[in-house]
Amino acid sequence: MRAIKSTIQLVLFIGTIISTSILIWAGFSGKQEIFPWLLSLTLTLAFVNLMLNQYNHKNGRIYWFIAGIALLSLGWSTFLLFS
């Protein structure tokens, strides 16, 4: 179980780095239509990774709440991007 959690955290970390890099590229290249989606994706990946790191912490429910809000934000920005 610990190996699976570590693998998921590594994938989330790499995804956060890649999405942050693409977010910076979109900011400099003037791709404003995908900027909100990339920002939501970056924040969602970072908060889910943080939630997994603090899973058994006494304030773990706060991280669940923040990760849920980030997922809702990602869903909303995806809807706006494709509508």
Image: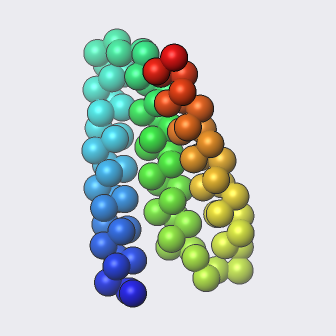
Q: Quadrant of residue 3?
A: bottom left
Residue 37, horizontal then vertical, whole percent = 46, 30
Residue found at the far top of this picture: 30
Instruction: Report the residue at 30% width, 33% height from top.
Output: 22
Q: Residue 68 appears at what percent x and percent y? A: 64, 53
43 shown above or below 62? above
Q: Nearest the camera: 8 or 60?
A: 8
Name the residue rendered at 50%, 73% in the picture: 53
Residue 78 screen position, x and y as percent: 49, 30
- x then y, percent, for residue 25: 28, 26
- Quick check: 78 left or right of 24? right
- 53 shown above or below 73: below
Q: Is residue 19 above or below residue 15?
A: above
- Who's the residue at 36% across and 50% down the image? 16
Rendered image coloring scheme: rainbow
Q: Is residue 66 left or right of residue 19?
A: right
In front of the other: 78 or 53:
78
